Each structure stands twice: as C-alpha cells, then as structure tokens.
Image: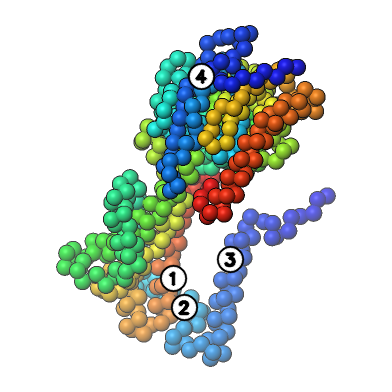
C-alpha cells in the first residue's frame, strides 16, 4: 500500500499556507492591540473589523459602492490596456517618436498624477468620468513602457524565424512579436492597474463622490476605524478581482506562461 | 578512399553528380563598416549544391560562415554576387529555403505540435490538415508523445528537433542549418547527427550545414567546403566518400579519421590565424 502524499506536495498547499499565514498575522495583530503594543485608535483589533462587516454591508450600502468602484476600475483597465498597448506599439514602430517621448513617458509614470484631479474636475465635472479618466491617466505610462520593453526585448532569432517563413508585417507582429512580448506587457498591465486603482479610490476619497473611496472618507471622518478598515478590505477585493481577471487573460493568451 | 580537393565550389561537382545544382552561390562579397575601417567578412565565395546533397561549410570562428548563412537565407542584404535557387535569383527570404538557427528558436508560447504546425498555419492550411501533417513531422524527429508539451518542458536537443521539424514541415527545397547543435553536448550532438542523417536519407532533403565542428561535418556531409579565416574565402572543397546510409558508428572508422585529419590540416592554419588575430585585438582593446 502506498503512503499518502505529504501535505506539502498537495497543489492546495500554497493556498493553505497563504491563508494560514494571513490568519496568523491577524491573530498577532489582535494580540498586540490587546497587549497595548499597538494603539487601538490607530489599528483597531481585527475582531472589531470583522464585527463591522455586517454594519458596513447593510447600513453603508457597500455592495452598490463596491460595484461602482469595480466598474470604474474595469472601465479604466480596459482603457489603459487598449491605449497603453497601442502606445507601446507605436513607440516600437516609430523610432523617432520613441527617442522623442520615451523619457517623458517614464517621467509621467513616476509623477504624482493624483494632484491633477482639480483639472479633471474642470474638464469632466464631478462625476464617474473624472474618476475613470484619473485612473486611466495614472495607469497608462507603465503599460506603454512595458509594452515597448517587451517588443524591443523579443529575441532576434524569433524575428528571423518569422522572416525565414516569409511572414508579412502583420503576421510578424501578431504571430511573433506580440506573443513574445506578452509576459512583459502583463507586468505593465499589473503595474498600470495598481496605479489606476490607487488613483480611482484616491479621487473618490478626495472629491467625495460615490464608490468605496467616498465610504472610507465618510467612515474615517466619523472616526469609525473598524468600519474604515472593513471598507478597505472591499478595495482589496476589487484589486483581487482585477488581478484574477488579468491572470486568466494571460493564461488564455499564453498558456505556456 | 579518395579525398578530392578542389579550389572552388563551382568547379567541384564530380562528373558522377553532374546534375543541375539546386542552390548556386556566385561570387559573394560582403563588407561591414567597423570602427577600425571596412571589414571584408566574405570574399568571393562561390558554391553549388546538388539536389539531395548534404553540403557543409566549415571554418574557424570569424570566417564569415554565419554571414554566408544569413545571405543565403535572405536575412542579410547589401552584398555583391548572387544567390540562385533552381536558377531563380533570390533576394530576401525564399519559400524554397528553410532555416534552422544556432540559437534556441522554438516559440515558447506554442506547444510542440503548434510550433511544428506554424508554417502550415501561415500557409493557410485547414486546422485538421495542418495537424495531420505536423504529426507526421513530430514522428519523423522522434517526438511522439510530446505533442502537447511546451518547449520549456523539453531538453535542448528536443527543442532543436522541434525547430528542425518546423522547418521541414514547410517542405523547403533546401534546408539551411547554422551550427544547430553548437549548444549541445558531444553525445547528444552525435545522436542528433544520426537523426539528421536518417531524415536526410528519408526525405532526400538538400541540406547546407554551417559548422565549426569537423566530426559533425564529416559524419553528415557529401561535400565539405573549408573557409579561410578573415576574409572568408573558399580554401578547399573536400568530397566525403563514406558509404551511406551512415550512422554515428562511422566516427570510429579509419576512413572517417583520415577525413577529420585532412580537414583539420586545412583548418589548423586558419584557426591559428584567427586565434592570434583575436588575441591582438584583445590586447588593443578592439572588439572581436
């Protein structure tokens, strides 16, 4: 009779380890708060945060706010992906354009773009469009830069294989350059989506308009720390959903990883 | 055993093989601009390859072998001379020429079968037909059972077989190989040589191999062109009169050893020149 496989060999082990580590972290925080090592007026006990969930869900209409923030994040993600990849391809195709603008694009990636929100309020008004456009602006540069990096980094021999098979320019791009660059493009997408989500929630908070950012603002102003942290958990949930979607998309587009 | 040594490729086809060449390379000269001035990489190289023939080009590093490979494959332009396939003047990549590269060149995002079906997909073949044909080439290179694996899951030798099958699937008239086994260990190289011989005998595939490995060249070839070190010129063309079908067992034969010695004799002087030149460049701090 064969011995049962050890738990560490199980494909569920990494997930169990991750959840276990998180649970251990929560317990440690709980202990540190009760031991007065952590100030409970800055970090509420995790048990209070957990207890605040039903209140935040029922009284603060968190689900509709969650849907609004998630929709804004999704809209911004689609926009940054389309325009970011197109921008990267454009810089790859036109060397002069690349030489002229690459440094500027890199500078934009590092700039605190959230400070532009008053300008966007003037242009688009106090509505979801402003929030989506802020997310779009913040997430664009990393995707452009990483798309460019992925295309430039395509191994010369793969391009030569394409040439040896007499591929057209379009085939060369779709059959070789694009799939070769995909892993790097997805790194850019993840970075871009992080920047977009930070800015979306940040602008919701700043202009006090809809979504989870506004809820966090309201709860913080009421000094409902447990509720604030519970609302932050929903922002993390949006982030997890966006990441899972990009991961699925990457696996579908490039199964070999 | 007769070692036939001739000064140029154009005059070297023995009377017994006096068929129309499928590949004719005539008077190729290629120069590059370098910081040290103009460098002639290939100087007046001519050769002709007969249908079904296995022809190798051997020379020391820096003799312009890979430049010649890129010119014949249509990846490099701006040269003097001409390349003809079955009499047709070739500019740029040509469907009759299939190329296998020295570097690992499988598409990592495609499975073995999808890599091999790639040229058939480009040719617009229906899915069922292209997979049927691709499976034939999977079997030909001995990769049955690995169809759904990805290159990252294969060894270096297996990946080179995938590249070979992918090139063969396009059914080129001429297969060009640029040191395809250079990154492999000696034993794998010999065994892959057997596979190449078997495929070549089965398909009667005209092949031009670029290599710096004498054993590999003698094991596989009907004729070997020895090139001089910089500028790369034709030093000699040697007929390899070893029986076919061959296997790697032939490397232990006396005749094989004599061919290796003969070619090394020609190459040694060139390789020594190359080594001294490389050393003096390094002393000057100039690029190789």
Q: Alpha carbon of mark 2 to alpha carbon of mark 3: how far?
A: 20 Å
- Look at 21% across and 66% down and name the residue there: A120
Q: Distance between the residues labelled 4 and 2?
A: 78 Å
Q: Which mark is residue A18?
A: 3
Residue at label 1? A233
Q: Position of residue A8 (x, y in %)?
A: 69, 60
Helix, strand or loop at label 1? It is: helix
In the figure, is residue A59 to the left or right of A26? left
Q: Which mark's residue is nearer the viewer, 2 or 1?
A: 1
User: A44 and A157: which one is in front?
Assistant: A157
Q: Which residue lies furthest to the left in this view?
A: A122
Out of B160 and B255, give the one closest to the viewer.
B255
Do the residues at discs 4 and 2 belong to one chain? no
Earlier along the polypeptide chain: callout 3 or callout 1?
A: 3
Q: Which mark is on residue A49?
A: 2
Q: In this view, does B187 lie to the left or right of B158?
A: right
Check chain identity for marks 3 and 4: say if they share one: no
Residue at 59% in and 27% down: B235
Task: Give the number of marks.
Answer: 4
């Amino acid at each position: 009779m064969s011995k049962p496989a050890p738990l560490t060999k199980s494909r569920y082990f990494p997930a169990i380890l991750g959840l276990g580590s998180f649970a251990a972290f929560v317990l440690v925080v709980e202990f540190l708060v009760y031991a007065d090592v952590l100030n409970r007026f800055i970090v509420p006990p995790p048990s209070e945060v957990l207890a605040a969930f039903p209140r935040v869900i029922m009284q603060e209409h968190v689900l509709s706010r969650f849907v609004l923030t998630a929709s804004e994040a999704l809209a911004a993600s689609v926009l940054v992906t389309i325009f970011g990849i197109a921008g990267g391809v454009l810089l790859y195709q036109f060397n002069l354009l690349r030489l002229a603008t690459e440094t500027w694009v890199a500078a934009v990636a590092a700039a605190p773009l959230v400070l532009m929100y008053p300008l966007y309020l003037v242009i688009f008004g106090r509505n979801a469009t402003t929030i989506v456009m802020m997310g779009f602006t913040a997430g664009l540069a990393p995707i452009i830069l990483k798309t460019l990096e992925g295309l430039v980094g395509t191994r010369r021999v793969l391009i030569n294989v394409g040439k040896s098979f007499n591929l057209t320019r379009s085939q060369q791009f779709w059959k070789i350059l694009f799939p070769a660059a995909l892993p790097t493009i997805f790194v850019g997408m993840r970075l871009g989506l992080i920047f977009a989500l930070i800015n979306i929630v940040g602008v919701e908070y700043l202009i006090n308009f809809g979504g989870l950012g506004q809820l966090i603002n309201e709860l913080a102003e009421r000094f409902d720390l447990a509720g604030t942290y519970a609302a932050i958990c929903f922002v993390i949930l949006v982030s997890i959903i966006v990441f899972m979607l990009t991961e699925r998309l990457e696996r579908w587009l490039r199964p070999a990883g | 055993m007769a070692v036939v040594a001739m000064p140029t490729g154009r005059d070297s086809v023995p009377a017994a093989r006096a068929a129309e060449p499928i590949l004719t390379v005539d008077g190729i000269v290629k120069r590059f601009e370098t910081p040290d001035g103009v460098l002639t990489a290939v100087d007046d190289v001519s050769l002709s390859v007969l249908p079904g023939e296995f022809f190798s080009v051997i020379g020391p590093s820096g003799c312009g072998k890979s430049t010649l490979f890129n010119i014949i494959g249509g990846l490099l332009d701006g040269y003097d001379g001409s390349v003809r396939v079955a009499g047709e003047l070739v500019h740029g990549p040509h469907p009759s020429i299939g190329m296998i590269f020295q570097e690992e060149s499988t598409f990592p995002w495609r499975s073995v079968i999808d890599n091999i079906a790639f040229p058939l997909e480009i040719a617009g073949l229906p899915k069922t037909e292209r997979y049927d044909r691709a499976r034939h080439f999977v079997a030909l290179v001995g990769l049955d059972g690995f169809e759904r694996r990805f290159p990252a899951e294969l060894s270096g030798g297996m990946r080179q077989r995938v590249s070979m099958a992918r090139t063969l699937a396009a059914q080129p008239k001429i297969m060009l190989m640029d040191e395809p086994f250079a990154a492999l260990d000696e034993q794998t190289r010999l065994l892959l040589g057997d596979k190449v011989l078997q495929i070549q005998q089965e398909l009667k595939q005209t092949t031009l191999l670029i290599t710096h490995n004498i054993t590999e060249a003698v094991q596989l070839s009907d004729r070997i062109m020895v090139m001089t070190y910089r500028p790369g010129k034709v030093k000699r063309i040697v007929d390899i009169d070893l029986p076919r079908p061959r296997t790697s067992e032939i490397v232990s034969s006396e005749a094989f050893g004599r061919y290796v010695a003969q070619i090394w004799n020609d190459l040694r002087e060139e390789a020594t020149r190359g080594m001294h030149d490389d050393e003096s460049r390094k002393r000057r701090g100039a690029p190789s």
